[in-house]
């Protein structure tokens, strides 16, 4: 659950904004001046900040600058004035968006959700972890290519998703129920032994491409479930 820090010296705006954001599934904390905002930011490390400009002790511009010096957390700035130069200044200081008072709380929630989604997509696109390599096994998330010692393996969708889940979560034991929930979904009404079948197929397809003993394994943990181990597993 994402945490949103709402900063405004108007207690009514804080109350209404908190209400609407919480109804949309966010955890919300509030601050009523710039100093308190910085304190909450340092303590809570929120996922998003709604930041008023005109506040006591320290204004929103100063708070935004201080936060931007150490964090890329998304910031939506609020102001009672909608001058173009203020909007430009806020964006130049690192704000992600700008909303003029009075505003529709539903619009604010929509903007928070959109910015968080955009930030997540940008982070995922920039992350180098789209390739997982475990010994001779290589999984490319972007192309969906799976190779063993450079040889391409053709896997159906569920087999690929099961393998990807394992390489993303090495050295952890998962029950059949865990794997069904993650790969097939909670509404799956088939037998849990389908997991055994898919793991058997994965083992056969991946190990068939090398004459050497594979340096990874989907190990059966008797009475519990399965565990993916690489060459450096304990």
Image (cartoon, rainbow, N blue to C red):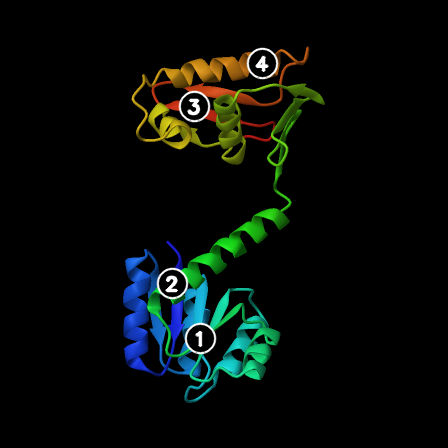
- Decide if residue 83 is in sight here: yes
Q: Position of residue 153 (x, y in %)?
A: 63, 19
State the SS at label 3. strand
Would you call the spot at circle 1 few (<14 residues within 10 Å), some (14-19), or many (20 or more)? many
Which label's residue is closer to the chain start, 1 or 2? 1
Task: Using the numbered discs, state the Cα–Cα distance from disc 4 to disc 2 in whole angstroms.
Answer: 47 Å
Q: Which residue is mark 4?
A: 205
Residues at discs 1 and 4 in contact (Cβ within 8 Å): no
Residue found at x 50% / y 22%: 159
Residue 226, disc: 3
Residue found at x 38% / y 18%: 222
Is residue 169 left or right of 209 when viewed as pictured? Answer: left
Rendered position, 61 above or below 160: below
Q: Which residue is mark 1?
A: 51
Front label number (1 vs 4): 1
Q: Which residue is mark 2?
A: 109
Which label's residue is closer to the chain start, 4 or 2? 2
- Decide if residue 234 is in sight here: no
């Amino acid at each position: 659950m994402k945490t949103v820090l709402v900063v405004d010296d108007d207690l009514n705006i804080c109350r209404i904004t908190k209400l609407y954001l919480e109804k949309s599934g966010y955890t919300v904390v509030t601050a009523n001046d710039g100093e308190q905002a910085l304190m909450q930011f340092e303590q809570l490390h929120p996922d998003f900040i709604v930041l008023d400009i005109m506040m006591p002790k320290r204004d929103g511009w100063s708070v935004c600058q201080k936060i931007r010096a150490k964090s890329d957390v998304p910031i939506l700035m609020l102001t009672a004035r909608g001058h173009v130069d203020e909007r430009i200044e806020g964006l130049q200081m690192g704000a992600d968006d700008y909303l003029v008072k009075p505003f529709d709380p539903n619009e604010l929630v929509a903007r928070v959700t959109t910015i968080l989604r955009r930030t997540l997509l940008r982070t995922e696109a920039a992350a180098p972890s789209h390739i997982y390599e475990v010994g001779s096994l290589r999984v490319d998330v972007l192309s969906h290519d799976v190779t063993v010692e450079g040889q391409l393996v053709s896997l159906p969708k569920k087999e690929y998703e099961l393998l990807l889940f394992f390489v993303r979560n090495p050295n952890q034991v998962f029950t059949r129920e865990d794997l069904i929930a993650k790969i097939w979904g909670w509404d799956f009404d088939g037998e849990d032994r389908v997991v055994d079948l898919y793991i058997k197929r994965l083992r056969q397809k991946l190990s068939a491409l090398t004459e050497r003993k594979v340096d990874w394994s989907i190990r059966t943990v008797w009475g519990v479930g399965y565990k993916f181990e690489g060459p450096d597993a304990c």
